[in-house]
Image (spheres, rainbow, N blue to C red):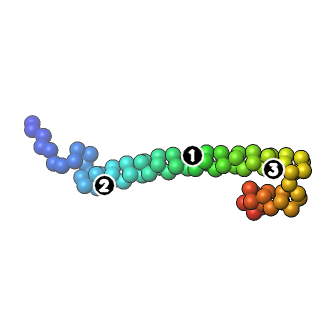
């Protein structure tokens, strides 16, 4: 007995191809989103670490008397983003 090929082997025809395309687009988008999110988190972490190092230096300068309280508070506000 001969079997004839009628389009897509999955039996869903064009609908199956569209679903497969949507699946792969969603999977690739998810991977890109996860990688970008991880990269931003690391960037934010290192940026905060730099701010804390700078704040430690600022505190040390204030303790040594190199800067006055007003300058200390102004620079601290700049480092912490106005918090």
Residue 81 appears left or right of 71: left
Disc 2 versus disc 1: nearer the observer: 1
| Rendered residue at 79%/57% (across/down) | 76
**Gap between marks 3 and 1 measured at Cα:** 30 Å
Q: What residue occupies the far left of the structure in this picture?
A: 1
Residue 37: x and y in percent read: 55, 50
Q: Earlier in the sequence, mark 3 or mark 1?
A: 1
Residue 60: x and y in percent read: 85, 46
- Element under label 3? helix
Q: Count residues near mark 3 (Cα–Cα under 10 Å), then give few for <14, some for 14-19, many for 20+.
A: many
Residue 29: x and y in percent read: 44, 51
Q: Nearer the viewer, residue 28 or 70?
A: 70
Q: Count residues near mark 2 (Cα–Cα under 10 Å), then give few for <14, some for 14-19, many for 20+.
A: few
Which residue bears the numbered disc 1? 38
Residue 68 appears left or right of 8: right
Q: What residue occupies the far front of the structure in this picture?
A: 66
Vertical side of 83 occupied by 46: above or below: above
Q: Earlier in the sequence, mark 2 or mark 3?
A: 2
| Rendered residue at 71%/45% (across/down) | 49
- Element under label 1? helix
Q: Count residues near mark 1 (Cα–Cα under 10 Å), then give few for <14, some for 14-19, many for 20+.
A: few
| Count of numbered tags | 3
Q: Are marks 2 and 1 in contact (CB under 8 Å)?
A: no
**Gap between marks 2 and 1 measured at Cα:** 30 Å
Which residue bears the numbered disc 3? 58
Residue 40 appears left or right of 11: right
């Amino acid at each position: 007995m001969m079997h004839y090929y009628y389009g897509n082997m999955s039996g869903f025809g064009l609908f199956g191809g569209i679903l497969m395309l949507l699946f792969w687009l969603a999977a690739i988008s998810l991977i890109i989103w996860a990688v970008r999110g991880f990269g931003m988190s690391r960037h934010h972490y290192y940026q905060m670490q730099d701010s804390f190092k700078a704040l430690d230096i600022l505190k040390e300068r204030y303790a040594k008397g190199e800067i006055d309280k007003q300058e200390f508070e102004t620079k601290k506000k700049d480092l912490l983003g106005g918090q």
